[in-house]
Amino acid sequence: MTALTSALEITKLAHEMHVDETELAFLATTSPDDLRDLRGIVSHAMFSRHESRVKGLAAVSKKLPAAVTAKITEIAMGPMLSARVAAVMDPADAAKLAGHLKPEFLSELSVHLDPSRVEGIIARLDEALVVDVGRRLLADGHLLTLARFTGVVGPDVSLQVMDGASGSEIIQVALFLDEPSVLDPMLAGLSDETLGEVVAAAGDHEEPFEALLATLEEDSRTRIASLT
């Protein structure tokens, strides 16, 4: 279990650093808690590296009409820099700007966001837009990103996003959750048919699935057992 959790944390760290996880293989024997702490340090360091420049861009964007800022954002700034700017913007201003950005650009931007820095923005977005962006992430295979946002958007919105996802995709999102407490409410919202697909896919993810079962409440485990 510890080895699996460490491997998942290495995958998350590689995503944070924008490197291939094979480059971090030397961390395989590091404890999950230490890897989690390291990921937090890396995230803070990468954000702080250009903090003054990013705050300057955020200040400029506040002086322009949202529609104009949106055009500049999509054409000149790109998803990664835009994600950095969003993290330091006033949540209300950022949410207004998001309404002028294309959903496909927002999905690309989301890959570079730290969900903990943008909770206030997401809370102000139209739910339909959040679901649309989430489904684009799902279609593009960004399961780790979806998992990280699940704790922010909550189980109800996550269930809408994952509607139509395969059993294998649901297992992988569950594995990468930063907030395990949302897993039981999510499973409770799945139909028996969908949960049956998750159980059927468990054969391809035997060790991870057993690890997930161990984290579930008794009601969830009982329901899964009835479908096995």
Image (cartoon, grey):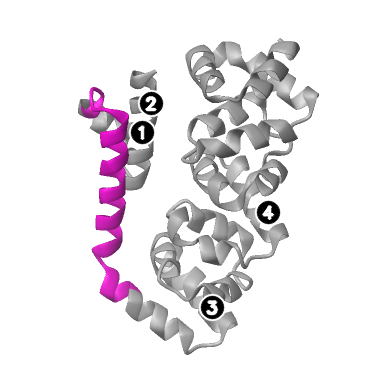
Q: Nearer the viewer, residue 37 or 8?
A: 37
Q: Secondary structure at mark 3?
A: helix
Query: Residue 150's x, y, as percent?
Result: 57, 45
Mark seen at residue 93: 3
- Name the front one of labels 1 and 4: 1
Which mark is in front, 4 or 2?
2
Q: Please tell me whether mark 2 sits on a helix, a strand or a loop.
A: helix
Q: Badge 2: few (under 14), some or many (20 or more) residues near its Cα, within 10 Å?
A: some
Q: Return the disc, 4 or 2, that comes first in the chain's sequence.
A: 2
Magenta-drawn stretch contains 42: yes
Q: As drawn, is 113 to the left or to the right of 41?
A: right
Q: CA distance from mark 1 to mark 4?
A: 27 Å
Horizontal side, residue 159 vs residue 42: left or right:
right
User: To which residue does mark 1 refer?
Assistant: 9
Q: Which residues fall within the magenta stretch?
A: 27-54
Q: Which mark is residue 132?
A: 4
Nearer the observer, 32 or 107: 32
Compare marks 1 and 3 and give the one earlier in the sequence.
1
Residue 82 is covered by the magenta coloring: no
Q: What distance separates the C-alpha of mark 1 from that of mark 2?
A: 6 Å
Amino acid type assigned to the residue bearing label 3 in the image: Asp
| Structural distance between the alpha carbons of marks 3 and 4 | 21 Å
Magenta region, main secondary structure? helix
Distance between mark 1 and mark 3 Cα atoms: 33 Å
CA–CA distance in space, label 4 to label 2? 30 Å
* Mark positioned earlier in the residue sequence (1 or 4): 1
Query: Tag 4's secondary structure?
Result: helix
Q: Which residue lies under the disc numbered 2?
A: 5
